[in-house]
Image: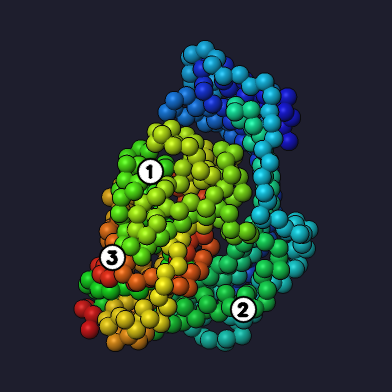
Amino acid sequence: MISKKLAIQVLNTLLSTGADFAEIYEEHTNSYSVSIENSKVDNSNSSYIEGAGLRILKGNRCIYGHTSDLSKKGLLKLALDLSQSFDGERIVEVKDLTKINYKNRNKITKSYNDIPREEKVRLVKIGTDEIKNRQDARIVRYVGSFSNNHTEVYVFNSKGKYFNRTQEHARMMFSVIAMKEGGFETGFDGPGCQDDISFFSEELIKKSANKALNTALLMLDADECPSGKMSVIIGNGWGGVLFHEACGHPLEASAVAKGLSCFSKDMVGEKIASDIVSAVDDSTIPHAWGSIDIDDDGNLGEKRTLIKNGVLTDFMIDDFNGRRMDRVGNGATRRQNYRYCPTSRMSNTYIDNGKSTKEEIIKATKLGLYAVSFNGGSVNPITGEFNFGCSEAYIVRDGKICEPVKGATLIGKGNEILKQIDMVGNDLALGQGMCGAASGSIRVNVGQPTIRIKEILVGGRGGQLK
């Protein structure tokens, strides 16, 4: 850890030419990963990184630099170099640093660093053996993997505050490729947590492996999806990635503050969704994949209600972009590691429970599509336009789930589909993923209950829906 004495010296060097804020972000991370391909250990890797990122702000200007040299000489050189970006006189001086205390909701009893590699390999093999034992000739490749990391962070800033944060994440992933003449399909599942290794029970591992396997085989024999405007039911859990991408990113201050979002800061209090839609970004869920007790600005994690009964109520805000919005940060500042300048990012983001059951939603749909999960897509946060490919989908006829279909793509605008949601289920679930943006790739949960969009354009190569 950088000493308080050195931190004060570095901060004051950063502030020497007129910056109104300075920050040091020190990180130490060790990681381990193992993957098994077709029942053979493919690789087993350990890594360690350490370094510091220095940031100075002046009004709406931000200067950032990083170094892996944590010596006094290395830190002061970087601080001096960055300070040359401004040419004013000192307006802030740091004389002391007081520690910020906070509640740790993600304590782990035994560190993953203390779990033998052999045990991690054994857990992965439970899943890969489950796939292997299916003995289906159409399965041409399957990969199981496990990864964990331990991160220790120290942050010092010119508000005279500092804190340290320790986090451990672990994730199990399974990917299956099935092939037959004329094409191939993939299936994937990847549960993750900030919890002890007991989270990865044999039951959970087998369920995850079978989910990836069954999706690949099911879609292999599926017909092409029809196209046109239709009602679409989106499954709970990982189905929430649609809201995350199409609506979540436009609600981050990094987009809103710069006018790069289909939503603006002046829209708070306006109706942007149907009455039955409420959406949340919650950093405080104990042991959840995307939780963070204290963010990189030193603000405590919060449960942020973004939309309440269809009305826009809040954004995810970092301190810097909050300057443009006349708002203060609300615990949403994150980054991948010390090489990235922090900004506002999602954590555990979901559409909240409604009053309908999944069965009621399906029964109420005469003709449409049931999209269980997605495999990627693209979004323009300025316009809200998106397209997302479905990795698992079915036709719904007369209130019943019928044949599986492949190649389905949902096309629309995030700010428009919010108003088209006409049924919201009561079966909220979360799914783990990685989100890439300006401050790097970070861990997030996406989620929702089963929902129905009254009408949305579906792309496919199977003709018209009948």
Q: Is residue 435 left or right of residue 325?
A: right
- Pick the front one: 131 or 27: 27
Q: Mark 1, mark 2: which one is toward the viewer?
A: 1
Residue that appears at 54% across and 20% down: 83
Q: Is residue 179 left or right of residue 409?
A: right
Q: Residues within 10 Å of mark 1 (few under 14, many from 20)?
A: some
Q: Which of pointers 3 and 2 lies earlier in the amino acid sequence? A: 2
- Disc 1 on helix, strand or loop? helix
Can the viewer see residue 39? no
Q: Mark 3, mark 2: which one is toward the viewer?
A: 3
Q: Which of pointers 1 and 3 lies earlier in the amino acid sequence? A: 1
Q: Mark 1, mark 3: which one is toward the viewer?
A: 3
On the image, the x and y values in percent for residue 368 come to: 29, 78
Residue that appears at 36% across and 51% down: 312
On the image, the x and y values in percent for residue 162 come to: 66, 34
State the residue position of label 3: 420
Q: Quadrant of residue 240?
A: bottom left
- Pick the front one: 108 or 314: 314
On the image, the x and y values in percent for residue 28 come to: 68, 43
On the image, the x and y values in percent for residue 185 come to: 43, 75
State the residue position of label 2: 206
